[in-house]
Amino acid sequence: MKAYAIDSNTQKTKSINIEMQAEAIHSFFDSIETDELSTLTGHAIYTDANAIKKSKKAYFIGEQFVVGDALIVGKNGAYSTDANISKKELDRLINHDVTSFYIDVLELLKDTDINLYRVFEVTKEKEDIQLNTEWVLYVFNLADEQTKDYFLEELKKANDAKKDITIHMQNMAILALNATATN
């Protein structure tokens, strides 16, 4: 099946043929922990869930923040299909310009068990909202420098105190939600 492989180190995208069997994705990353992202219409983006721990480089595919190598296959419901996006179009969607905020955050997160895409729930005004760490980083990346510095300092403190970083991100999500509500 036609797929695309993105090498985060070389920043190159190549078209590959992959036989989608039960362990194909895990074999591609040589990892049992992978993430599946569905932000690219009609496709699945697979990544190594341990890419942050491995200090892999980050980039964007459209608005999707991705860390480490990626495998992109077509998706039709629950079934994998040939990738039908052109390499040229995919390359246009890829942006390797990552702000220093993201780079600094990833450096602080590399010794944690955080997963950027694992959903957690926060409550705001009696409404349960499902978010993830990627969203928290996105919102704080849009903030002013003082707020970014606050976020980085609080993350450093949480790391140093060996706090649960997922709970820390949930608390940061609540702060971000409250800030967006007042603006």
Image (tube, grey):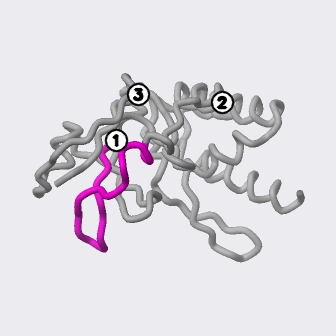
For residue 148, which quarter of the picture? top right
Three-letter code for the amino acid on which mark 2 is drawn: Phe
Label 1 Cα crowd, 10 Å radius (few <14 / some 14-19 / many 20+): many
In the picture shown, does residue 123 fall above or below 5? below
Q: Secondary structure at mark 1?
A: strand
x and y percent of residue 94 in the render?
49, 40
Q: Is residue 157 left or right of residue 93?
A: right
Amino acid identity at mark 3 = Gln
Which residue is labeled 2 in the image? Answer: 101
The residue under the point 76% across, 29% down is 149
Residue picked out by circle 1: 70
- Report the Cα–Cα distance between label 3 and label 2: 20 Å
162 with respect to 41 (left or right)? right
Rendered location of residue 85, percent (x, y) = 37, 54
Magenta residues (range)? 71-90
Question: Of discs 1 and 3, which sits in the foreground?
Answer: 3
Give how far across and how far down residue 72 sits, in percent.
Answer: 32, 50
The residue identified by callout 3 is: 11
